[in-house]
Amino acid sequence: MTEERFEGSFFSLPVIGSVLTVVSGVSFLFLCMIFPIVGPAAVHGSGSPGAGPVPHLTQNRIAFLGVLVISLVLAVLAIFSKLERRKIDGSPLPYMSIGLAGILVFILLIFVTGLTAI
């Protein structure tokens, strides 16, 4: 029985990059599902007379920001892992992970500036 010796860090393992990519994609899907909790209806009300912002808007914003940060960290870790792997075997550039991180940074910017409530 031969034992295969792996050169590189933990993040350069192919399975780690794949798992981080999938988990970051699922996290982004969940973020998209909870996006309405900080949207215009949550901030301004439903449009009915007497309707106003939801009473738990602050908790919604904290929860949304938490999921957004987790998604962004997972996407950046996926990029880092894929780039580490690329140094070893010349794997392709992780365009999808980079694109996902860019979308998440854009969502973070529109959330911080308050444009999600327009």
Image (cartoon, rainbow, N blue to C red):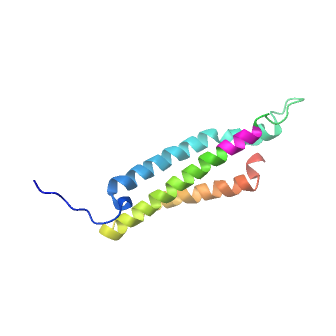
The magenta-colored residue range is 57-63
Which quadrant of the structure image shows residue 17? bottom left
Vertical position of residue 65 compared to residue 4: above or below: above
Query: Going 60% across and 46% down the picture, which residue do you hit?
Result: 67
95 to the left or right of 85: right
Q: Main secondary structure of the magenta part?
A: helix
Q: Furthest residue to the right?
A: 50
6 to the left or right of 37: left
Vertical position of residue 37 compared to residue 83: above or below: above
Provide residue 41's location: percent of width, then percent of height.
Answer: 77, 37
Vertical position of residue 79 compared to residue 46: above or below: below
Q: Is residue 82 visible?
A: yes
Provide residue 20's location: percent of width, then percent of height.
Answer: 43, 52
76 in the magenta segment:
no
| In front of the other: 62 or 85 | 62
Q: Is residue 96 visible?
A: no
17 to the left or right of 62: left
Query: Going 50% across and 53% down the picture, which residue do you hit?
Result: 74
Query: Going 36% across and 67% down the picture, which residue do you hit?
Result: 86
